[in-house]
Amino acid sequence: MKKIKYYIATLFLLSLIGFTSCNDTYEFHEQYTIDGEIVYTNKVDSLTVLPGNNRLQIDGYISNAFNVNEITVYWDKGENSQVFTYEKSTEDTDKINLIINDLEERAYEFEVYTSDTDGNKSVKVITFGSAYGETYRSNLSPRAVNTFNFDVTEGSATIEFKGIEDLTRNTEIKFTNTDGAEMISVLIPAEKDIVLEALDITKDISFRTLYVPTASDEETGEETSIDQFPSDWKQFTLPAIVSILESVELIPNLGGTDITWSNPNNINNTLSFTYTVDGGDITSDVTSNDSEGSASLSGMEAVEQSVFISISDAYGNSFGTIEKTVQPKAVVKFDRTDWTIVDFSSEEPYEANWGPEQQGSARAILDGDSSTFWHTAWAYSQPIFPHHVTIDMGEEKTIASFEFFTRENKTDGATVHEFWVSSDNITFTKVADLNAAMTTNDAYSVNAAPNTTGRYVKYLAVEGSSTHTYLSEFNVYGVE
C-alpha cells in the first residue's frame, strides 16, 4: 500500500513539472508570434567585395529565392543603405552583383538582407570591402622606361618598358605622328616593347599606366576590381644622347672631315659614322665620354657626299641614323711666293760660278727653276749625313704631301728622306719618310700623316751613297 502511494506521488510531481515546462515554452515562443509566426527569406551567401573608383561591387549567390524581390545593403551602422531589385531567374541559384556608388575612399562593413513582397526579411549577412579614390590614384607612377631607340630613316621609335607588378595593367603612349595627328598606342602588360610608327620626334611624347587595387583571381584570372586607375600622364624625356647627336658638326678638311660634338654631361656613348671610300661603305665607331668630343674621317673624295651618323649609350638607348653632308677639301700645290728658307745644315755658294747667283744655295729649291739646285758644302768642307733645309710657309697650313726633285741628271744624292713639321720652328714632328734613291728627274712624292698641320717644314736627308746631297725643287700640297 505504501508503494502505491509513492508511485502516485511521483506521477503527480512529474505532471506538475511537465505543465510548468510547457507553460514556459509557450511564453518564450509567444513573444515571436504575437503578430503571427516569423518567416525568414533566403539569405545571400558567399559574399565578396570588388573595389572600384569611389564605388564597389558586392557579389554573392542566392538559391531558391522564389519570393525574394529586394536586397538591401546597409553600411555605416545602418545610417546609409541602398535597395536593389531582385528577379528570380529560371536557375536554382542566381549570382548577384550589387554596385554601390558615390562612396568615400575608405574601408566599409556591410550588412546585407533580402526581403519578399510580404515584408519578410532574411537574417543579416556581413561582409567587408574598400572603395578607392584620388588618394590611391595620385600615388601611382607610370611604368618605367628601359630603353628608347629611334630610327630616323623609318621614322619610328621603339620604346622598351621595364617589368610590371601584379597590379599593373595597360600602358598608354600619347604622341603626334608626322601628319600632325595625336595618337595613342597601348602596351599590354604581357609585352615590353612598343613601336610608335611615323613619330614626329619634335613633338611631346607622354605616357601613363593603368592599375587595379587588388590582383586578379589566380585560379580564374578574373579581375577582382571593377575599375582601373590611371597614373598621371608623364612626359617622356628623350635620352641625353639625342642632344649629343644633334650637336655633331662636320668640318671639311683635306681628303676628309673633322667631326666635333658636345657632351656636357660626360655620358659614355658611341658615335657611328658611315661614309664612302673608293665606292665602298666604311663605318667608324668612336666611344667617348669627353665633354667635347672629336674625330676625323679620311680617304674621302673632294666632292659633296653624305655621312650617316647614329649614337648609342651603355644603357641600350640609340638614336639615328641622321644624314649630314660634307665636301672634303681638294689637295692643291701651295703658292711658294712668300716662302723663305730659315735654316739649313750647309750649302755650296761656289756652285754659282757655273750658274745663277742662287746656284748651290738652299733658296734655289724655291725659285721655280729646275735647272738650279741646293747642294750641300763640298768646296771647303764635306759634312756628312744628315743634311737638312727648313722652310717657313708664312702661316699654319693643313699638309697632305711633299714633292721634291733631284738635281737634273744626278743620281748620287740622298737615299733616305724624312719630313718634319712645326708650328713654332722649335718643336718638330716627323710626319713622313721615304726610302728612295733619286735616279730620275721625275718628281718624288710622299704623303703626310693624316691631319698634319704646321707652318715650318724641314726636309731631312738621312742617308746617301756619298757624303753630299742636293735638291732642285721642293713643293708642299695640302689645303690653303
Image (cartoon, rainbow, N blue to C red):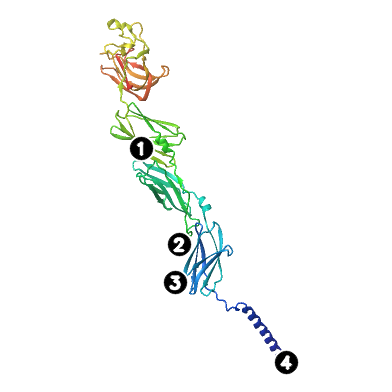
Question: The disc labelled 4 sits on which kind of residue?
Answer: Lys
Q: Which mark is residue 322?
A: 1
Q: CA distance from mark 2 to mark 4?
A: 76 Å
Q: Residue at x 42, y 17 (%)?
A: 426
Front tag of 3 and 2: 3
Question: The disc labelled 1 sits on which kind of residue?
Answer: Ile
Question: The disc labelled 3 sits on which kind of residue?
Answer: Ser
Q: Nearer the viewer, residue 333 or 140?
A: 140
Question: The disc labelled 2 sits on which kind of residue?
Answer: Thr
Residue contact at pointers 3 and 1, CB within 8 angstroms: no
SS at badge 4: helix
Label 2 sits on residue? 220
Residue 83 higher or lower than 355, as above or below = below
* Earlier-in-chain disc, 1 versus 2: 2
Q: Residue at x 35, y 19 (%)?
A: 418
SS at badge 2: loop
Label 4 sits on residue? 5
Residue contact at pointers 1 and 2, CB within 8 angstroms: no
* Earlier-in-chain disc, 2 versus 4: 4
Residue contact at pointers 4 and 3, CB within 8 angstroms: no
Front tag of 1 and 2: 1
- Rendering quarter of residue 420: top left
Q: Which mark is residue 89?
A: 3
Q: CA distance from mark 1 to mark 2?
A: 50 Å
* Earlier-in-chain disc, 3 versus 1: 3
Q: Residue furthest top?
A: 353
SS at badge 3: loop
